[in-house]
């Protein structure tokens, strides 16, 4: 009897060890193109794609441990790769995930934080198939207002900048509006537009294509996206390029500042509207997050991903891989997620 019990216990222990061996403390799951958000209660969510599937993993302990990923949805022929993939934004009571199929339809899914389950809510673009390029961004304020920007071909069959918003408790997004139409037929067609929100302030950054130059431009709204200012160029230099950089940079509203980061000719810059760009270093695929002195920039340098703090230009090497995204917590700790060998990695620094 004792021998049988010992055999059973040994088998259970072996299975537990085998299970533990599969768990990597720095890996969330197989996947690509991770995006990260934090809601009003400090819950962190990471969304990513696996072929046609969208998954979301959650951390309730400030990024120390992430849950087993939950399947959000499966989208036939979903865009995934080169800044294309599921997007996420979180607020007080809701989180929203968006994803675009290769036919050009923007699907969206909503999580009621009290219900704990994702719901398919339909599509955002009100013209079927108008977003075939698959490039978009979303953002949220603290009061359950969500905002989306994307490349859309409904005007002249060329990519322009379109925008929509979602008010609290609404089941559909607002009428899609043309936020910017290029006088040179279209904007840069392979660079992701980016959006940031603070209160009623909305800022959109996109790469334009004017007179042969692929420079970054900024749109601003002070009334929650009801209207936007004329597009204004960022930085003093220009990039004459007969091709697409496939690198849209990042944008962040912090207090009264609209902070941007982007790359030109393989060099990453930090820039505020109307001011000269500041060199961060050689790199690409950059993003920005944080508030005030706690703002930082992520970028890829060769096969490594790094964080550079703005306050003292401190450089933190995160690891090998690509497509680093991050958030800065109130305690100044940074939660990073990125791709490495078809896995979604995470690290707290």
Image (cartoon, helix red, strand yellow):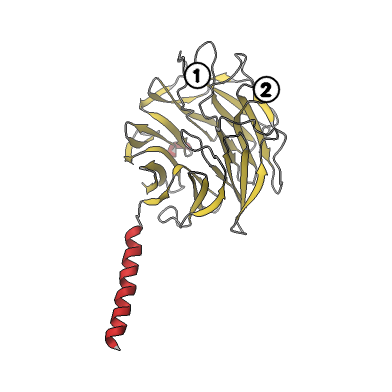
In the picture of the structure, the residue carrying the numbered disc 1 is 215
Q: Which residue lies furthest to the front in this view?
A: 76
Percent position of residue 166, x then y: 68, 41
Residue 155 vs residue 200, the one in the foreground = 155
Q: Mark 2 points at which residue?
A: 155
Of the two numbered discs 1 and 2 on the same chain, state the one appearing first in sequence. 2
Image mark count: 2
Indicate left or right for 132 with 65 as reference. right
Q: How crowded is mark 1: few (under 14 residues within 10 Å), some or many (20 or more)?
A: many
- 158 lies above or below 316: above
Residue 134 lies in quadrant? top right
Asked if residue 182 is positioned above or below residue 268 in the image, the reply reads above
| Quadrant (top left, top right, bottom left, bottom right) of the N terminus | bottom left
Displayed quadrant of residue 226: top right
Marks 1 and 2 sit apart, C-alpha to C-alpha, by 22 Å
Instruction: Give the x, y percent position of residue 288.
Output: 46, 35
Depth check, front residue: 323 or 238: 323
Q: Which of 170 and 51 is in front in this view?
A: 51
In front: label 1 or label 2:
2
Residue 296, x across and y down, in percent: 42, 36
The residue drawn where x is 35% and y is 63% is 19
Residue at point 32%, 79% (across, down): 8
- Mark 2 residue crowding within 10 angstroms, few (<14) / some (14–19) / many (20+): some
Rendered residue at 39%/33% (across/down): 299
Can residue 256 be seen here? The reply is no
Give the x, y percent position of residue 193: 55, 29
């Amino acid at each position: 009897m004792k021998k049988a019990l010992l055999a059973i216990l040994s088998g259970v222990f072996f299975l537990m060890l085998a299970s533990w061996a599969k768990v990597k403390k720095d890996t969330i799951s197989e996947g690509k193109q991770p995006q990260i958000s934090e809601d009003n209660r400090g819950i962190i969510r990471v969304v990513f794609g696996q072929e046609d599937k969208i998954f979301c993993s959650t951390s309730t302990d400030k990024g120390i441990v992430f849950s087993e990923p939950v399947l959000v949805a499966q989208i036939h022929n979903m865009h995934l790769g080169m800044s294309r993939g599921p997007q996420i934004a979180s607020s007080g009571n809701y989180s929203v995930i968006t994803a675009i199929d290769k036919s050009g339809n923007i699907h969206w899914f909503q999580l009621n934080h009290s219900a704990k389950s994702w719901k398919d809510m339909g599509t955002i673009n009100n013209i079927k198939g108008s977003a075939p390029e698959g490039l978009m961004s979303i953002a949220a304020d603290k009061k359950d207002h969500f905002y989306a920007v994307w490349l859309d071909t409904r005007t002249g069959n060329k990519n322009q900048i379109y925008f929509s918003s979602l008010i609290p408790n609404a089941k559909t997004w607002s009428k899609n509006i043309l936020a910017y139409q290029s006088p040179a037929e279209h904007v840069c067609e392979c660079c992701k537009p980016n959006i940031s929100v603070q209160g009623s302030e909305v800022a959109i950054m996109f790469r334009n294509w004017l007179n042969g130059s692929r420079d970054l431009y900024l749109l601003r709204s002070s009334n929650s996206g009801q209207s936007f200012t004329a597009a204004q160029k960022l930085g003093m230099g220009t990039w004459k390029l007969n091709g697409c950089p496939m690198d849209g940079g990042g944008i962040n509203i912090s207090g009264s500042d609209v902070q941007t980061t982007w790359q030109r000719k393989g060099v990453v810059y930090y820039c505020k509207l109307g001011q000269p760009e500041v060199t961060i270093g050689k790199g690409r695929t950059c993003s920005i997050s944080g508030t005030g002195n706690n703002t930082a920039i992520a970028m890829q340098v060769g096969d490594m991903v790094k964080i550079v703090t703005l306050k003292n230009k401190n450089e933190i090497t995160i690891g090998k891989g690509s497509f680093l995204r991050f958030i800065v917590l109130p305690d100044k700790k940074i939660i990073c997620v990125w791709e490495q060998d078809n896995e979604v990695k995470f690290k707290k620094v």
